[in-house]
Image: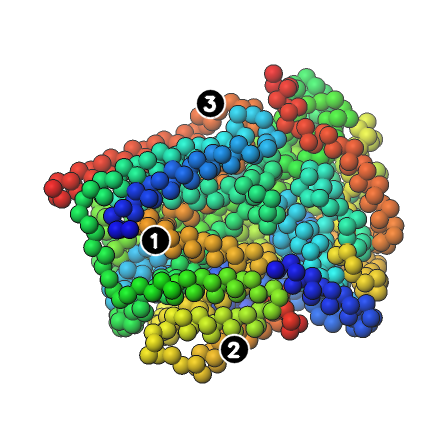
């Protein structure tokens, strides 16, 4: 989709958000039966969402009628890297309690660095060392010195 | 009072004590400049370390942490556009553009020096007018907090700049996200859909980390790493303090106003540096003769943000020592620390433990100077950090953010929250929505709602009674004014655009 | 996925512990004690002070972990779901009954292993401003009867003091205007700033205000007068038959081996008898006690029953107010 249509979509999205918010608010079983209960503020926010969504939508239409927008390209966007980073972080959060901080973090650092580095600067050895050292230093500083219990996982 | 000072001086100026101050400032700066680790966390983690120490020495350490931590956030804010702590969020907005232009020295110099000034100002207020300030804080009933929250929310409009509708929508999004969790007043779960993990709602810290740090990582993943940018960032030269006398004089009113905002927000229990730096920035922008320059890299923004966040330090200590009520999250930790050392903050503290109190004042003062020295001389070292490529630095920062998020409530769920806000921030940026208003929404939404409903409880449902209170009226009026002004300037900008573009 | 791995780990550790190997070496690393409240509050401070002594006795660090939120439910739930290896404990007070009554959680203290009661707080008081016309509970009751729904009483909704106020209203037939202000610190601010007429709070936090003549205590909710504050009459003495001791207990996740709990308890018993601990806690007007698990369970069951008497009260709190207004 050409960039100039994005605001139309955003506007609709915001309106949808308002609708969702209002419908979710009706499910709030309130102990406070007065007018200004726990559903009051959400309702106001929802209404504002719908109004603003409309404004953005209208602005989006004006934009769509205008010229096509040139996308400034500084390098080819690597969407696969973005997605991979997200998956990596999710995996990190998932395995953190079971594998423990030390291993998860070392693995995370290693893979994340590989994902971000430009192709010509890859250095597995350096990355590996940094990953392990950082992970160990952080773990011991927080667990031993500060007594902040980080997940020990299978090592502890 | 002079004898008290002497007693305090004696207590605080021992070798042991000064060593602790220096250690505290050092650790504080480190926790402050690493995104994900906060001042509150630093104090919480160091309190057990103070168990064997005499009270004054323990307090010296904590004061060092407070000062170092609050100010330290500016380093990462300026150099890598990620705030080290919630107290330096607004510093990113002008601090980083300055650095990107090769003026990192100026940005850092301004940030550090005005942090120092802000703290100094607030120490003076603390020492000389703490009791009247505390009495003033007691005048703030729920209706005042509500009006203040409303006024601060209008900053969203100022921050949004040209994209007013989108900016307000994002601010509302912040408020909506803050609804998740246990509702105020009746304590029923809202929008949790049965997930007990959500009962506590979203904490501002993981949200911040996600919006700034994770979004940045996703950004870097998307584009090829900009190597040239790092070189520009590193090549700054610093003459003296980094800024000229002329600039200093020009910032006088900004500084004074920001310090007052910081102290004002500090003395109110429940709001702290995280709010004051943003509000100060917003006020500075709206009162400036050249608001459109804010965000492009002018020192006004950095001055407003850092002066306010650091003057909140002294401000937050006022209610802590005079009433025994913490002014912000850091002082809440310090309160626990005081109690564990057998000191009960409150009306009798000055009388029963005068030397300790004045020892705290002196420790703050010394810590302030130590902070100034450490940060200035450390600027070279901070710049070195930038020679570490982003593809190594950012993953390490994320790992530390995970520690910070986890350390909040000792659960992995908060790490997921970080991820959620990271994706949210990234998507918002892609859709060309401003992301900064979300923070205001998350912090101020609950403040507005809770106090609105509490105020109504007190008046038995009569909203009009809110208007009978003078301070409330002042803030409500200011809110209306801000809305009108923002609206007018927006219309004016649109007209200019049409005239120029057509 | 997460839960499954946790259960696996829990099973494995439980098995190791059950073989007695774990129990003999217990504790061989730091013990996390979860406090379902913010740092600096009375639960937190009590836990840290007792923790200091437990540390010395057990020879391993006691790490206090604050898990605030959900009215205390986040913390209790975290411990409930933790591995039953003796290295995660909960330090809490009667608010857990409240959480259960209000339906915020579907479990009670009997879903945990009980490790005894450690601190007794008989300092729950009603406080008014020193300049207020109410000299004792009867004054307050008279004024409330004359002005139903007008006298402002501050509380934290769903919290310990909220229940006390509701019980008070039920016993005396009065109607206050119950206003939510938040936790202890905010209650103090509210009373200092004259926002409200009365608050329910623990004595320890406001003792300096009493000494400096800013606050006046009009009654203490214990069975007998508290020897640390002998001048304060109990509610019962003043004709209001309610008493709410605030007791702090340790709980471990269900399935924690008995040997481990016994060791922890032995340490707790020793610590509770330490005069130095007593002195420190007395500064905050609370007392170390040691009520062994068996006794504690009986005591807590009885207390829970008392609390549950008021279940309808607290669930109907708001509607009652609306009816009065009409």
- The residue most toward the bottom is A125
**Does C237 appear above or below C40?**
above
**Does residue C97 appear to the left or right of A26 in the view shown?**
right
Q: Residue at x 54, y 47 (%)?
A: B201
Residue C167 percent coordinates (x, y): 74, 30
Per the image, the residue denoted by label 1 is B429
- The residue most toward the front is A1
Q: Residue at x 40, y 81 (%)?
A: A123
Residue B474 visible in the displayed image: no
Residue C36 percent coordinates (x, y): 66, 51
Secondary structure at badge 2 equals helix
**Does residue C108 appear to the left or right of B374 in the view shown?**
right
Structural distance between the alpha carbons of marks 3 and 2: 62 Å
Residue contact at pointers 1 and 2, CB within 8 angstroms: no
Residue C66 percent coordinates (x, y): 63, 55
Q: Residue at x 28, y 51 (%)?
A: A1
Secondary structure at badge 3 equals helix
Per the image, the residue denoted by label 2 is A132
Snapshot colouring:
rainbow
**Does C267 appear above or below A33?**
below
Check the residue under mark 1 and report the chain it is in.
B
Secondary structure at badge 1 equals helix
Residue C311 percent coordinates (x, y): 74, 33
Per the image, the residue denoted by label 3 is B464
Check the residue under mark 3 and report the chain it is in.
B
Which quadrant would residue B4 be assigned to in this image? bottom right
Which quadrant would residue A58 be assigned to in this image? top left
Question: Is the residue at mark 3 from the same chain as the one at mark 2?
Answer: no
């Amino acid at each position: 989709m050409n960039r100039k249509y994005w605001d139309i979509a955003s506007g609709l999205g915001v309106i949808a958000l308002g609708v969702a918010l209002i419908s979710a608010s009706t499910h709030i079983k309130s102990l406070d039966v007065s007018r200004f209960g726990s559903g009051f503020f959400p309702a106001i926010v929802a209404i504002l969402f719908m109004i603003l969504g409309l404004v953005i939508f209208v602005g989006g239409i004006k934009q769509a009628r205008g010229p096509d927008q040139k996308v400034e390209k500084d390098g080819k966007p690597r969407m696969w890297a973005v997605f991979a980073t997200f998956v990596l972080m999710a995996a990190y959060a998932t395995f953190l309690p079971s594998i423990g901080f030390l291993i998860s973090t070392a693995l995370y650092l290693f893979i994340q660095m590989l994902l971000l580095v430009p192709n010509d600067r890859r250095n597995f050895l350096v990355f590996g060392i940094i990953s392990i050292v950082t992970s160990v230093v952080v773990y011991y500083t927080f667990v031993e010195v500060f007594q902040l219990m980080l997940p020990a996982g299978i090592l502890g | 009072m002079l004898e008290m000072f002497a007693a305090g001086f004696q207590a605080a100026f021992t070798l042991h004590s000064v060593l602790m101050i220096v250690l505290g400032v050092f650790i504080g700066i480190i926790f402050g400049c690493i995104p994900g680790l906060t001042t509150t966390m630093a104090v919480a983690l160091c309190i057990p370390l103070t168990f064997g120490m005499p009270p004054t020495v323990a307090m010296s350490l904590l004061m060092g942490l407070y000062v170092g931590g609050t100010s330290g956030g500016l380093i990462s804010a300026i150099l890598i556009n990620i705030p080290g702590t919630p107290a330096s969020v607004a510093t990113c907005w002008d601090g980083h553009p300055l650095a990107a232009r090769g003026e990192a020295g100026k940005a850092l110099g301004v940030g550090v020096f005005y942090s120092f000034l802000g703290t100094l100002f607030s120490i003076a207020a603390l020492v000389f007018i703490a009791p009247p300030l505390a009495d003033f804080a007691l005048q703030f009933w729920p209706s005042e907090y509500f009006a203040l929250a409303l006024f601060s929310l209008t900053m969203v409009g100022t921050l949004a700049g040209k994209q007013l509708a989108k900016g307000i929508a994002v601010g509302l999004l912040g408020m909506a996200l803050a609804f998740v969790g246990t509702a105020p007043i009746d304590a029923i779960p809202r929008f949790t859909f049965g997930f007990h993990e959500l009962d506590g709602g979203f904490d501002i810290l993981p949200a911040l980390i996600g919006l700034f740090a994770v979004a940045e990582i996703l950004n870097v993943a998307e584009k090829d790493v900009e190597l040239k940018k790092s070189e520009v960032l590193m090549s700054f030269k610093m003459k003296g303090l980094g800024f000229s006398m002329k600039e200093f004089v020009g910032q006088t009113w900004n500084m004074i106003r920001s310090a007052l905002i910081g102290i004002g927000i500090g003395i109110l229990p429940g709001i702290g540096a995280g709010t004051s730096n943003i509000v100060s920035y917003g006020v500075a922008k709206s009162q400036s003769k050249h608001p459109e320059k804010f965000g492009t890299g002018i020192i006004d923004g950095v001055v407003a943000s850092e002066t306010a966040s650091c003057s909140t330090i002294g401000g937050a200590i006022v209610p802590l020592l005079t009433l025994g009520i913490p002014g912000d999250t850091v002082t809440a930790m310090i309160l626990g620390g005081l109690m564990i050392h057998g000191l009960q903050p409150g009306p009798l503290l000055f009388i029963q433990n005068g030397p300790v109190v004045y020892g705290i004042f002196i420790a703050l003062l010394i810590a302030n100077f130590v902070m100034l020295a450490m940060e200035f001389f450390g600027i070279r070292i901070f710049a070195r950090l930038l020679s570490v490529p982003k593809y190594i630095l950012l993953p390490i920062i994320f790992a530390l953010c995970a520690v910070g998020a986890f350390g909040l409530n000792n659960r992995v769920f908060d790490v997921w929250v970080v991820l959620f806000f990271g994706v949210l921030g990234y998507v918002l940026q892609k859709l060309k929505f401003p992301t900064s208003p979300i923070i205001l929404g998350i912090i101020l939404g609950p403040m507005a709602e809770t106090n609105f409903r509490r105020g109504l409880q007190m008046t038995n449902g009569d909203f009009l009674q809110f208007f009978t209170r003078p301070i409330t009226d002042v803030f409500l009026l200011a809110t209306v004014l801000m809305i009108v002004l923002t609206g007018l300037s927006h219309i004016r900008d649109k007209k200019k655009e049409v005239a120029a573009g057509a | 996925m997460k839960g499954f791995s946790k259960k696996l780990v829990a099973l494995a550790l439980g098995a190791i512990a059950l073989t007695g190997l774990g129990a003999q070496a217990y504790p061989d690393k730091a013990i996390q004690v979860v406090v379902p409240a913010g740092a600096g509050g009375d639960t937190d401070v009590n836990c840290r002070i007792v923790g200091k002594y437990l540390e010395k006795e057990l020879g391993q660090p006691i790490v206090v972990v604050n898990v605030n939120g959900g009215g205390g439910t986040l913390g209790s739930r975290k411990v409930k779901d933790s591995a039953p290896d003796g290295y995660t404990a909960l330090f809490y007070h009667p608010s857990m009954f409240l959480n259960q009554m209000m339906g915020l959680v579907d479990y009670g203290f009997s879903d945990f292993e009980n490790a005894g009661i450690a601190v007794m707080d008989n300092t729950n008081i009603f406080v008014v401003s020193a300049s207020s016309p109410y000299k004792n509970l009867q004054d307050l009751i008279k004024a409330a009867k004359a002005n139903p729904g007008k006298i402002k009483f501050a509380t934290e909704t769903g919290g310990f003091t909220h229940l006390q106020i509701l019980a008070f209203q039920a016993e005396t037939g009065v109607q206050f205007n119950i206003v939510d202000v938040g936790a202890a610190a905010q209650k103090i601010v509210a009373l200092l700033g004259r926002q409200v007429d009365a608050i329910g709070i623990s004595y320890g936090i406001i003792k300096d205000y009493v000494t400096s003549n800013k606050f006046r205590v009009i009654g203490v909710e214990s069975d007998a007068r508290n020897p640390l504050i002998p001048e304060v009459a109990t509610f019962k003495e003043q004709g209001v038959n309610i008493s709410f001791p605030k007791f702090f207990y340790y709980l471990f996740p269900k399935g924690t081996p008995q040997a481990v709990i016994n060791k922890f308890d032995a340490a707790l018993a020793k610590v509770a008898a330490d005069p130095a601990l007593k002195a420190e806690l007395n500064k905050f007007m609370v007392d170390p006690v040691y009520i062994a698990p068996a006794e504690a369970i009986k005591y807590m069951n009885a207390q829970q029953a008392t609390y549950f008497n008021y279940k309808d009260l607290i669930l109907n709190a708001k509607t009652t107010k609306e009816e009065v207004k009409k």
